Image (tube, rainbow, N blue to C red):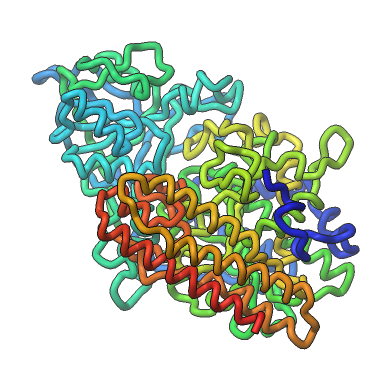
């Protein structure tokens, strides 16, 4: 296993101790203030472009301004999508109703905010309205391989309503896959094998999903494109091209209590082992002897979402003339969003206070301008951050983007994903930041499950990369996948035990009673977040190390070779390009280490911008995505795929396209190598 010291000993990691200014950063977070801000942010529901969204935007703007940032609210015209009536789901035979789903999340005495209007309005963003009646078929996770298994079992989903469970891929892709096979509607539930009693105690007694808990969410086909499908803020054509990436048939999330009613009476062939969850019933495939009858009522309307943008001016000339560091978190939520997103929102606000403390106590002005962004619309499909990336040309100057979304959903481990050139930056920060536990300060390196330690880590490169590879599902997507800005995202968690995700119960009570009662992990996340921002903004040599990215590229080529057995693609151009990039990266590292004040600016510019050389004119079937090294998997959404154009061509059994994509990827890697090698001339 290649550990950090063996990978590189560059200036991005090597340092004796915290500087005096960094010591101020580490001492600044207040657990009491973090808790108070979380309480303030979770008092009311605040869907994108709602009154609650604007209320929280003003709270965040005022807090950032009080910390010394120049803060403003930017309104973005968008198309809102909301339920206009309660959904209904029945099992019917003839004119007789056999049973009816509750489609309601009960009020909990221990959770004071659970009596909210949305507890009876489970819905999927961008699902169309509809009244549908059809046979029901169980399709497991709704992945292409699951539909292959149904076909092999003689079960036809054409004209049926499909019942799928969460997991395996982004929820919108479950609808996409169902529509592609002729299904007339999609239901999605959380099986307790994945998120419920089979994993541990359920809320309010523990962190896992209760039987009536429902996961709302966006129905966008996120791996095809992100952002507002209507692009109301643009005058010209959509950068998504002609790609449709919202459902055309109704989609509804339900609880596993409601799913049990339908599954236990479904009938048909017994399900394969891979389809079997943890409910106390025999899983079968259907089709049902009864009809499922679904009513979904939603509506589109024009609205304006509020992004909050706050700037701490650096010595570099600002966002237009300098090389600013961007950091962000989204603020909108399906209901209250105590964990998603406000564990991250309070971290962003407290990091602003920590950076302000350094300014106040030491007279510091950052070398590079810092821009903090509180996005709206992330939950519907990264709407606010995508709009910003498509309307603010100055983003081309960005050095890096640091994202925090679900900052704290547990307290046992720290995981992270990002551009591999940031491996060293992140490793140094987790070594130097800490969490207070049992009266002692524990380095975050003791909690970090690095990608090269975790062979089950999606997007990881075991033995090579410390950061997992970014897929999608949060606001780094347009930054890295479209603009080529090095990005990183992290989260404290506990083996996936976040059972209130996108439910009425993602509340202040859940955080304070179950997840992080003392807010010590929120404070630790603040230390890590602010330290990453500080080092990106203040180190003379930009903390970007292409040598670690070269290791990742070489590993990507090996992964691709393992997929190539049936195609016999000629991967020699990619092998050669990876070798050329490795040589250029090693040379650039030597030059950067030896750089003088007179030569450092030229070196930094190459280090800052070489990532953009990996951008193509657009990936096959999804031109909005441009990065040839990584993208969300076409049929995954959240999870990442390396050399995504090639992999998608292989998945589609298109040998000619695969060869074309190999050539394009090799060309982009060669261009990045040649550009980076320019520092050695």
Quarter of the figure that contains the C terminus? bottom right
- Residue 264 location in percent, x, y? 30, 14
Looking at the rendering, which quadrant does residue 530 occupy? bottom right
Q: Residue at x 16, y 26 (%)?
A: 135
Q: Residue at x 30, y 35 (%)?
A: 145
Horizontally, residue 264 falls left or right of residue 54, namely left
Q: How many marks?
A: 0
Residues 60 and 560: in front is: 560
Quarter of the figure that contains the N terminus? top right
Q: Is 321 placed above or below 650 here?
A: below
Looking at the rendering, which quadrant does residue 234 occupy? bottom left
Q: Is residue 80 visible?
A: no
Q: Residue at x 56, y 40 (%)?
A: 457
Residues 471 and 316: in front is: 471
Horizontally, residue 329 falls left or right of residue 146, namely right
Horizontally, residue 355 falls left or right of residue 405, namely right
Q: Is 209 placed above or below 668 here?
A: above
Outermost residue on the left side: it is 94
- Residue 407 location in percent, x, y? 63, 47
Q: Is 310 placed above or below 110 here?
A: below
Q: Residue at x 73, y 39 (%)?
A: 447
Q: Is 518 placed above or below 427 here?
A: above
- Residue 451 location in percent, x, y? 62, 44
Residues 132 and 430: in front is: 430
- Residue 105 location in percent, x, y? 43, 28
């Amino acid at each position: 296993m290649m550990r950090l010291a063996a990978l590189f000993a560059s200036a991005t990691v090597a340092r004796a101790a915290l500087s005096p200014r960094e010591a101020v950063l580490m001492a600044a977070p207040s657990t009491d203030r973090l808790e108070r801000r979380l309480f303030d942010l979770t008092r009311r529901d605040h869907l994108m472009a709602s009154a609650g969204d604007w209320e929280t935007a003003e709270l965040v703007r005022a807090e950032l301004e009080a910390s010394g940032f120049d803060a403003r609210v930017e309104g973005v015209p968008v198309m809102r999508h909301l339920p206009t009536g309660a959904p209904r789901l029945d099992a019917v035979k003839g004119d007789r109703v056999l049973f009816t789903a509750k489609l309601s999340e009960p009020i909990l005495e221990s959770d004071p905010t659970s009596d909210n209007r949305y507890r009876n309005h489970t819905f999927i963003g961008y699902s169309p309205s509809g009244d549908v009646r059809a046979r029901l078929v169980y399709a497991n996770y709704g992945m292409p391989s699951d539909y292959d298994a149904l076909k092999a079992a003689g079960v036809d989903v054409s004209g049926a309503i499909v019942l799928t469970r969460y997991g395996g891929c982004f929820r919108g892709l479950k609808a996409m896959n169902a529509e592609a096979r002729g299904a007339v509607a999609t239901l999605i539930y959380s099986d307790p094998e994945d998120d419920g009693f089979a994993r541990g105690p359920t809320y309010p007694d523990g962190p896992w999903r209760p039987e009536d808990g429902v996961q709302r969410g966006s129905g966008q086909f996120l791996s095809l494109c992100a952002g507002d499908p209507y692009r109301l803020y643009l005058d010209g054509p959509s950068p998504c091209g002609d790609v449709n990436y919202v459902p055309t048939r109704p989609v509804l999330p339900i609880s596993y209590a409601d799913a049990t009613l339908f599954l236990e009476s479904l009938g048909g062939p017994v399900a394969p082992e891979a389809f079997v969850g943890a409910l106390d019933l025999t899983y079968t495939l259907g089709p049902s002897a009864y009809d499922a009858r679904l009513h979904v009522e939603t509506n589109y309307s024009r609205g304006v979402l509020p992004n909050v943008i706050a700037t701490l001016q650096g010595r570099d000339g600002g966002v237009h003339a300098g090389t600013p560091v961007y950091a962000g978190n989204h603020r909108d939520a399906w209901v209250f969003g105590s964990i998603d997103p406000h564990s991250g929102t309070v971290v962003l606000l407290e990091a602003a206070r920590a950076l302000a403390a350094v300014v106040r106590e030491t007279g510091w002005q950052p070398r590079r301008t810092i821009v903090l962004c509180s996005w709206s619309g992330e939950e519907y499909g990264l709407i606010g951050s995508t709009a910003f990336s498509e309307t603010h040309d100055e983003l081309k100057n960005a050095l890096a983007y640091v994202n925090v979304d679900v900052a704290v959903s547990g307290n046992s481990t720290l995981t992270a994903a990002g551009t591999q050139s940031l491996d060293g930056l992140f490793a140094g920060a987790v070594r130097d930041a800490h969490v207070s536990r049992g009266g002692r300060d524990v380095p975050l390196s003791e909690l970090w499950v690095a990608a090269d330690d975790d062979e089950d880590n999606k997007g990881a490169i075991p033995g090579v990369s410390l950061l997992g590879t970014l897929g999608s599902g949060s606001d780094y997507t347009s930054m890295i996948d479209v603009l080529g800005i090095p990005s990183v995202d992290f989260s404290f968690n506990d083996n996936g035990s976040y059972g209130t995700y996108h439910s009425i119960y993602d509340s202040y009570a859940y955080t304070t009673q179950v997840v992080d009662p003392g807010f010590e992990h929120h404070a630790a996340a603040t230390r890590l977040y602010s330290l990453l921002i500080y080092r990106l903004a203040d180190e003379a040599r930009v903390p970007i190390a292409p040598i670690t990215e070269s290791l990742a590229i070489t590993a990507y080529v090996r992964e691709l070779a393992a997929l190539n057995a049936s195609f016999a693609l000629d991967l020699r151009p990619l092998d050669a390009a990876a070798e050329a990039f490795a040589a250029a990266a090693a040379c650039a590292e030597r030059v950067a280490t030896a750089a003088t004040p007179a030569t450092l600016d030229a070196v930094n510019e190459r280090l800052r911008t070489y990532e953009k050389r990996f951008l193509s004119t657009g990936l096959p079937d999804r031109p909005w995505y441009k990065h040839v090294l990584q993208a969300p998997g076409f049929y995954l959404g959240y999870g990442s795929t390396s050399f995504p154009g090639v992999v998608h061509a292989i998945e589609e059994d298109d040998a000619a396209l695969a060869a074309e994509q190999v050539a394009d990827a090799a060309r982009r890697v060669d261009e990045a190598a040649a550009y980076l090698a320019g520092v050695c001339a």
